[in-house]
Amino acid sequence: MATQPATTTIELSPKESQLKNLLLDATKFINESGSFQEPVVLRWAGGWVRDKLLGVESHDIDTAINVMTGEAFALKLCELCEQADTVDKYGMAKSDVGNIHKIARNPEKSKHLETTTIKLFGYDVDFVNLRKETYSEDSRNPQMEFGTAEEDALRRDATVNALFYNLNTGEVEDFTTGLVDMKSRLIRTPLEPFQTFMDDPLRVLRLVRFASRLEFTIDSAVEEVMSDRRVLDALRLKISRERVGVEVEKMLKGNHPRKSLEYIDNLGLYHTIFTDPSKPDIPVPDISNWKLAYECLDSLRRSKTPGSIYDVLVRSDEAAYYAWILAAVVPWDNVKAPPHTKKGKAPPPFGTLAAQEGIKSPGKLRDLVTAANNNRAEIMSFVTAVLNKQPSAMERDKLGMAIRHWESKNGHWRLQVLYALLVEAMVVLAAASTTPTSNDEFLKKWQQFLDHLQDLDVMEAPTLKPLIDGTQLSKALGTKPGKWMAPALDVCIAWQLRHPEATDPAGAIDEVKIRRVELGIPGN
C-alpha cells in the first residue's frame, strides 16, 4: 500500500493558475480519448515547489506525468493549443506557446531520461514521466522505469527537492520529510545517505550547492557520509569532471560562494574537486590556511565601496566568478612544479591543472590562473616598491608597461593583483595570531598600492591608444617591418606613458632612433 503523503497548499499567481488550468485541460483532453486505463495526473516537482514555499518566484517548472512520456504529453498539449476554442479561452498569442524541444537521454552527462521542454505563458516547462531508478554495482547509469510519485520522490537528492504539487488536487505532496525539513531549514537525503551518494556521488556537490544557496544546514549524519572516503573515491573516479565543473560553477555564481567553499573545506572535499584525477601521484597542497583566503575575498566583497579594493579589482559578474575560482586554487600556488629540464614548453602550474582537469574550466579561465601564478612575484615586487616609496614606483612608464604585460595574453590584470593579495593573505593573516598584524593593516597596504596606481593614472594602460602604429613607425625609420617592430612599439608606448599630454609621436620616434642598435632595427 502506498504511503499517504503529508500535504499543504500553495497560493498560485494568476499566470501560474492560467498555466495550471491549461495543463488540466490537456489531461482532460487525453483522458477523454480513452488512451490510458489510468487517468493522467500531473505534478509540478522539485525546485519550483521548494522555491514557491520559500516565497521565491521561479520560471522553470518541472512537470511529472504518471502514465505518459514527456514528449507524448507535449504533443497532445500542442494539439489542444491549436484548437480555436482553446486559443479563445486563454487569449493565446503566438508567443504564449513555444516550440517543443526534446533533450535526449545522455547517461554519461547524468541525463538518464529524455525531457521535453515547451515555453508556455513565459514559463520554461519541462515534461517527464515519474520514474524509479535501479543502479548496478558496476555502473553509475541507472535503469529507468515508470514509477509512482513516492518512488520518484525517493530517488531524488534531497527531501526539500522531493516535493510535488498535484495539479489535480491543488495540494503539495510530501512522501519524505521535505515539509518538516523546509521548516527546519535542513538538508537531508530521502534514502539512507550512503546509498544516495553511492548511487550518484555528484549528489555530494549538489547538496553543498543547495545548502549554500538556500542557507540551509546539512544534517550531521549526511555530512559524515559526504566525507566518507568511499564516497569521495567514487566522486573522484566515477563522475565526469565536466559534471563536477558544472556544480562548482553554479556554486560560485550563486549568492553565497563563500559558504560553498567553506563546506568544501570543512567536509574534506577540496582534494577531490580541485585536482587532476588522472595523476594519483600529484602533490597535495596545504589547505590549512585556505579559509583565510576565501574569507578575505568575501570580506572585500561585502565591504565594497567606490574606490575600495573589490570595487577596483572586480568589475563585472564574470570577474566576480573568476575571482572565486582564483580563491579556490590559491593553495596550489605554494606547490612548486619540479624544474623543467626537457625541451619544449614548460608544463602549466599545478593551479592551472586543478582548474583544467579538476573542474574542466574553459581556456580563458585556465589562462588567467596561469598568468596570475606567473606574474605574482612581479606584482608583489611593485607592491613593495610602492610601500617603500622606491623611485621605480614613481615611474609611470614602468608601472604602466607592467600592467600592459600582465594584461597582454590572458587579460584581467586586476584579478591577477587580487590573486596575489589572496595568496599573501594565507601567509600574513595566519601569522596574525602571533604578531600584531591585523586584517585592516594587511588590506591597507593593498589599498595604498591601488590608490597609487590611480594617482599615476595607469589603471587603463592596457587600452592606451598609441600615437603611432607599426606602418607609420616603419616609414619614419625608413625600413621594412620585422621582429624589431613589437619591442620598438613598446618603446613608443613607454614614451607616451612618460608624456601623457603629448599628441605628436615625434619624441617617441626619436627615442626609437636612439635605441636603434639595441632594438635590432636595420639601416642607419
Image (cartoon, rainbow, N blue to C red):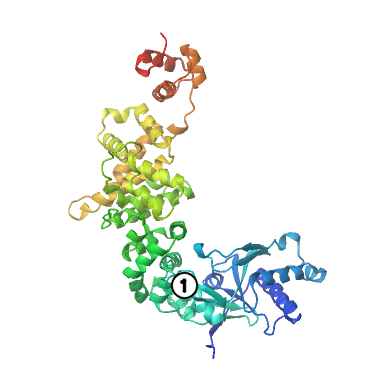
Residue 27: x %, y % from top left: 70, 77
Identify the residue at image location x=17%, y=54%.
434
- Quarter of the figure with residue 112: bottom right
Quadrant where the C terminus lies?
A: top left
Q: Using a 10 Å C-alpha cutoff, classify the residue at mark 1 as few (fewer than 14 neighbours), some (14 to 19) or many (20 or more).
A: many
Which residue, as the protein is rendered here, is positioned at the far bottom?
1
Residue in front for this viewpoint, 382 or 287: 287
Residue 66: x %, y % from top left: 62, 79
**Tag 1 residue:** 157
Residue 112 vertical position relative to residue 346 in the rendered view, above or below = below
Residue 355 vertical position relative to residue 270 in the rendered view, above or below = above
Residue in front for this viewpoint, 386 or 77: 77
Residue 86: x %, y % from top left: 78, 70
- Quarter of the figure with residue 262: bottom left
Amino acid carrying mark 1 in the image:
Asp
Count of numbered marks: 1
